[in-house]
Image: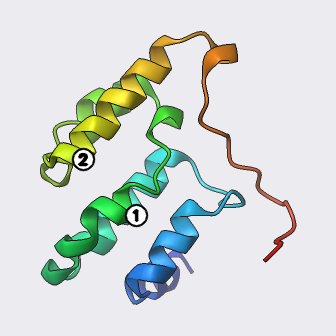
Amino acid sequence: GRHAAARGFAALTPALVEEVLGDDRLNADEAVAFRAAVAWLEADPPRSEVADAVLGRVRLPLVDPVFLADVVEPHALMATDENRARVHAAFRELALPAERRVTPPRTPGASWTP
């Protein structure tokens, strides 16, 4: 079930975690993707070396603004210059009308093309 899937995700290599989180077909809310990335990073302290790359795959402009402000922005892993810039860019994009936003939505169910 869910715990087995979580253990499986926790065992993935950094490259696979980036691939999964960056995949347009990921059928998950971005808040779930953020929490999964954080759990994966916190499961093994040496993974902090790839934190910016892994967290960079989460499409922050697609999260709820309250979640972005209350959970993402204050998280210790978001304290790097690169991640602070991502949070700022997400807030900026969220402030724009929908037709001016540039972050593509996920497309669950789309076929995979290498």
Secondary structure, mark 1, is helix
Q: State the separation of the CA atoms marked 1 and 2.
A: 19 Å
Q: Earlier in the sequence, mark 1 or mark 2?
A: 1
Do callouts 1 and 2 mark residues in contact (Cβ within 8 Å)?
no
- Judging by the rendered image, the residue that carries numbered circle 2 is 82
Which residue lies at the image location 55% right of the left edge and 72% below the top edge? Answer: 19
Residue 39, placed above or below residue 73: below
Within-10-Å neighbours for mark 1: few <14, some 14–19, many 20+: some
Residue 10 falls in image quadrant = bottom left
Q: Could you tell whether 28 is left or right of 71 in the image? A: right
Residue 58, placed above or below residue 100: below
In the current view of this chain or complex, which residue is farthest to the right? 111
Q: Could you tell whether 14 is left or right of 8 in the image? A: left
Asked whether residue 5 appears in the rendered view, the answer is yes
Name the residue nearer the viewer: 39 or 24. 24
Residue 96, placed above or below residue 75: above
Figure coloring? rainbow
Name the residue nearer the viewer: 24 or 29. 24
Residue 51 falls in image quadrant = bottom left
Q: Point out residue 76 in the picture as x, y percentages from the top left corner.
A: 12, 51
- Residue type at tag 2: Glu
Asked whether residue 71 appears in the rendered view, the answer is no
- Judging by the rendered image, the residue that carries numbered circle 1 is 36
- Residue type at tag 1: Ala
The mark total stands at 2
